[in-house]
Amino acid sequence: MGPVTRPITQPDPNLWMISSRICGACPARHVCGSQHSVHACPDDLLSLGPSSQLHPQDPDADQMTADLGSFDFPNASTPVKKPGFPAFIPWVRLGSHAKWRFPSWVAVPLHEVLLEDGTVHDVDRVRRSLNLRSDQRVVISCHVKDKLLGRVWRKRTRFVRSLRDAGFDSILAPGFSVWSTHCRFQQLTAIAQSNRLFESLHLEGVRAVPHVSGFTDRDWRRAGLWLAAHSEVEIVCVDVQRSRQHSSWTEEMAALRLLRSTVGRPLRWVVNGVSQHRRIEELSRTLGDLTVVSADVYMRAVKGRQPWPVCGNERSDLAKHEIFARSSSAFAGFVRGLSSDQGIR
């Protein structure tokens, strides 16, 4: 009788993990740390079922590995300086905003400027659409769906060169999602894709803010150790999910605390995707110096809701541009106040 095969996640009667036959040849094994844990990839591709995940045995895995070149973090050869971000940058969409009063910085989502061929509109088109002055700054936010980031990845050379010449003041580098439902190889690929895109932007001279993410403690420590070793990086971006589940939020805060403690030095943290004042307070206590990029202020105005920080769907009699102005002022003042409370300038 031949040996009994078991999933990598199932211990044998002696309470040690069965070594998967795929781990030894996996190109991401040196950064994985999950070969003998419940996070390890399943033994074979078929066990994933109908899925778009990338498994080490997937026919596309070799090409992806070649495209990545490395699963390691980039070597930031030139400084990544703070681009003068304020405490709050509203996420806005292009359109008719003749009466809207935008602050000194605005963030536009990538899907508003990205073309099918991988190039981007230049910043002048954005300024005309939003009726911005020449001294108002525009940053591109890549907190968008992975499907769109997939297009960027496939056409990354054209994307980076186009962005270099487009005139934007900064870009929050793309961060591919790291989902708990994805196999470990897919998670590590997503982290590596984010790293490679930032590296390409950085080397091309684009004013890009690196994006860090992770799933296991090892992932967050790796990101923290990279930042600790590269003091020339003064600013970094993280995405915070808008989950209503307290357990998910608790896990995210634990990961960010681990990241911050591993870095061991002050940074400017750009946080995407949060609008609740209690959560922003906790982020400030956890990370320190914050810039919050949020769509809530803009979407509240577009939908005619009460100005921030009112929660829910309560309608307002105010004009949309007035809701936006009041919400922006309140949001920015709140985040600035948190920094002042901590003695941050």
Image (tube, rainbow, N blue to C red):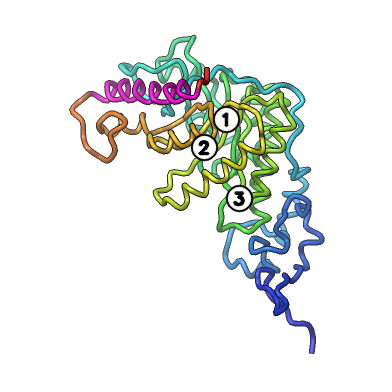
Amino acid marked by disc 2: His
Judge left or right: residue 25 versus residue 201. right
Q: Earlier in the sequence, mark 3 or mark 2?
A: 2
Looking at the picture, does residue 65 appear above or below residue 313? below
Q: Characterize the magenta stretch by its predominant secondary structure.
A: helix
Q: Nearer the viewer, residue 276 or 139?
A: 276
Q: Earlier in the sequence, mark 2 or mark 1?
A: 2
Amino acid marked by disc 1: Leu
Q: Residue furthest bottom?
A: 1
Amino acid marked by disc 3: Phe
Gap in Å between the C-alphas at discs 3 and 2?
18 Å
Residue occupying the point 40% across, 22% down: 332
Dot 2 corresponds to which residue?
A: 143
Looking at the picture, does residue 22 appear above or below residue 214? below
- Magenta range: 319-342
Dot 1 corresponds to which residue?
A: 172
Q: Nearer the viewer, residue 259 or 113?
A: 259
Q: Which mark is residue 215?
A: 3
Where residue 169 sits, quadrant-wise, is top right
Residue occupying the point 66% across, 33% down: 264
Looking at the picture, does residue 17 appear above or below residue 127? below
Crowd tier of the residue under label 2, counting other residues whose Cα lies within 10 Å: few below 14, some 14–19, many 20 or above: many
Q: Are marks 2 and 1 in contact (CB under 8 Å)?
A: yes
Gap in Å between the C-alphas at discs 3 and 1?
20 Å
